[in-house]
Image: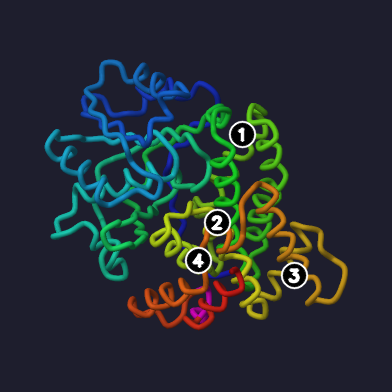
C-alpha cells in the first residue's frame, strides 16, 4: 500500500426528512445563496422543503446551473455573491449544481485575474479560500457531495476542466433517497454508470497489496450492479434507492482511493467528448472505458482478472478469454441500463479522433493514466475501438 493523506470532514445527513434540519446546519445570521439547476426541485417538492426549513434566513437565489456547469453562467453567480455579501452557498441539485457551487465559492474569493486559472493551471495554482457551502443532493451520481473536486465547462473555448481544493468541501450534505422517486430513467442510468466508473478509475490499475481498498471498491461495484437495475425497475423502492445513493457517495469520497494508484484517463478523454459534443458525462465514460480496458489490458491484467472474478464471477477460460469476458460483462451492464458504448450512437465518426488527440498534445500531455503511459496514439486507438 502506498502512503496517503485522507481528510474528509463532510457531515452527512442521510435518510427521509433530513432536509428539515437545514436551519440547524446553516450558520445563523449569514446571508445564504440557494443555487439550483433547471427547476426540477420545484416539481419534486425539494424547493418547498428547503424554503420552509430556511424560514427566517436572509436568502438570495440563483438558478439555471447547467448539466456540465458553464463557467460563463457561474461567473454571473460570483458577481451576485460579491454584491450581496453572501456568506454561505447552499447547492440544491445533483453533481453539476454542486460542482458549480464549488467553483462559485472559490471564484468569489479568488484574488487572481481570472478564476479559470485554477482549472487551466491547476498543476501550479490552487484555490485555497472559498465561501462556506453545503448541499441538498437530488441526484446520486458524482460523489461531489462528499469530496473536494469539481468540473466546469467553458463554452467559449470548448474546454471541460477540473479542480480540487479542500476549501470547497461541503460543510454538510443532506442525502434523502426519496428524491430518486421522481428522477427520469435517463438520469438514474447516468448516475449508476457515473458512480461505477468512479470506482473503476481508482481500482482497475495495478496491485499494491491494498486488500481493504480493493474489497471496499468491489463492494461498491457489486452494490451498483445489484441495486441499480432494481432502481431502474422501481424508482419508489426506497431500500434500493438508498443503497444506490450511498454507493454513489462512497464511490468518490476519497476512501477507496487511499494508498492505491489511480487512473482517471477515462474521465480525461470523456471530458473532451462533453466539451465538443455536449454528451452527458456518464455516457462519455461508458464509451471510453471499454476501449481503454482493451488497449491497456496487459498493464491492467492482474486487476482485470481480479475484477472479472470478484465482481462478475468470470472464472473459466484462459486469462485472455477471461479478460475478454470481463470487458463484455462491463459493456453489457452499461447497455442493460440504457447507456450506449459507441461513438456512432451519438453520430460521432472517426474524423473527431484527431481533434481529441490535438487537444491533449496542445496541453503538453505525453501520457496519462496510472502509469502515465497511455500515449496520444493510444488515446486515438481507444476511441477508434469504440466507433
Return the residue at label 3. 305
- Asked whether the beta carbons under mark 2 and mark 1 sit within 8 Å of each other, the answer is no
Q: Position of residue 373 (x, y in %)?
A: 51, 82
SS under mark 2: helix
Q: Position of residue 218 (x, y in %)?
A: 68, 55
Q: State how far apart marks 3 and 1 are (Cα).
A: 30 Å
Residue at x 34%, y 55% (from the top left corner): 153
Mark 4 burial class by Cα count in 10 Å: few <14, some 14-19, many 20+? some
Quadrant housing residue 255: bottom right
**Region in magenta:** 369-374
Relative to 104, residue 205 above or below: below
Which part of the image, by quadrant, shows the C terminus?
Answer: bottom right
Residue at x 74%, y 60% (from the top left corner): 329
Return the residue at label 4. 264
Quadrant housing residue 201: bottom right
The numbered disc on residue 242 is 1
Mark 1 burial class by Cα count in 10 Å: few <14, some 14-19, many 20+? many
Q: State how far apart marks 3 and 4 are (Cα).
A: 20 Å
In this rendering, the count of numbered labels is: 4
Return the residue at label 2. 198
- Asked whether the beta carbons under mark 2 and mark 3 sit within 8 Å of each other, the answer is no
Q: Earlier in the sequence, mark 2 or mark 4?
A: 2
- Say whether residue 338 is left or right of residue 108: right
Which residue is more in the foreground, 60 or 218? 60
Q: Earlier in the sequence, mark 2 or mark 3?
A: 2
Mark 3 burial class by Cα count in 10 Å: few <14, some 14-19, many 20+? many
Q: Earlier in the sequence, mark 3 or mark 4?
A: 4
- Say whether residue 255 is left or right of residue 295: left
Q: Position of residue 214 (x, y in %)?
A: 66, 60
Amino acid at each position: 500500500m502506498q502512503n496517503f493523506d485522507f481528510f474528509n470532514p463532510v457531515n452527512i445527513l442521510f435518510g427521509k426528512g433530513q432536509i428539515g434540519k437545514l436551519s440547524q446546519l446553516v450558520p445563523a445570521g449569514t446571508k445564504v445563496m440557494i443555487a439550483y439547476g433547471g427547476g426540477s426541485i420545484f416539481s419534486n417538492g425539494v424547493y418547498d422543503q428547503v424554503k420552509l426549513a430556511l424560514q427566517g434566513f436572509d436568502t438570495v437565489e440563483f438558478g439555471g446551473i447547467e448539466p456540465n456547469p458553464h463557467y460563463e453562467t457561474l461567473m454571473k453567480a460570483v458577481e451576485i455573491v460579491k454584491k450581496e455579501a453572501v456568506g454561505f452557498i447552499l447547492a440544491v441539485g445533483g453533481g453539476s449544481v454542486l460542482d458549480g457551487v464549488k467553483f462559485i465559492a472559490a471564484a468569489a474569493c479568488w484574488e487572481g485575474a481570472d478564476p479559470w486559472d485554477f482549472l487551466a493551471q491547476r498543476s501550479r495554482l490552487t484555490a485555497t479560500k472559498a465561501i462556506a457551502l453545503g448541499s441538498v443532493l437530488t441526484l446520486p451520481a458524482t460523489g461531489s457531495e462528499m469530496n473536494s473536486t469539481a468540473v466546469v465547462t467553458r463554452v467559449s473555448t470548448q474546454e471541460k476542466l477540473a479542480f480540487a481544493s479542500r476549501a470547497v468541501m461541503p460543510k454538510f450534505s443532506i442525502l434523502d433517497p426519496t428524491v430518486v422517486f421522481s428522477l427520469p430513467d435517463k438520469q438514474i442510468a447516468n448516475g449508476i454508470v457515473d458512480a461505477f466508473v468512479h470506482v473503476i478509475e481508482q481500482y482497475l490499475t495495478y496491485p499494491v497489496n491494498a486488500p481493504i481498498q480493493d474489497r471496499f471498491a468491489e463492494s461498491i461495484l457489486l452494490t451498483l450492479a445489484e441495486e441499480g437495475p432494481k432502481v431502474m425497475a422501481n424508482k419508489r423502492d426506497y431500500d434500493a434507492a438508498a443503497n444506490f445513493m450511498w454507493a454513489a457517495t462512497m464511490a468518490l469520497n476519497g476512501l477507496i482511493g487511499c494508498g492505491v494508484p489511480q487512473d482517471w484517463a477515462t474521465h480525461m478523454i470523456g471530458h473532451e467528448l462533453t466539451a465538443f459534443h455536449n454528451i452527458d458525462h456518464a455516457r462519455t465514460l461508458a464509451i471510453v472505458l471499454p476501449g481503454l480496458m482493451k488497449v491497456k489490458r496487459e498493464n491492467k491484467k492482474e486487476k482485470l482478472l481480479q475484477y472479472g472474478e470478484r465482481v462478475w464471477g468470470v472464472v473459466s477460460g484462459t486469462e485472455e478469454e477471461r479478460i475478454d469476458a470481463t470487458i463484455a460483462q462491463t459493456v453489457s451492464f452499461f447497455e442493460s441500463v440504457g447507456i450506449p458504448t459507441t461513438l456512432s450512437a451519438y453520430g460521432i465518426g472517426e474524423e473527431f479522433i484527431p481533434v481529441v488527440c490535438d487537444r491533449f498534445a496542445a496541453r503538453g500531455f505525453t501520457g496519462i493514466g496510472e502509469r502515465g503511459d497511455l500515449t496520444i496514439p493510444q488515446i486515438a486507438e481507444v476511441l477508434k475501438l469504440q466507433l
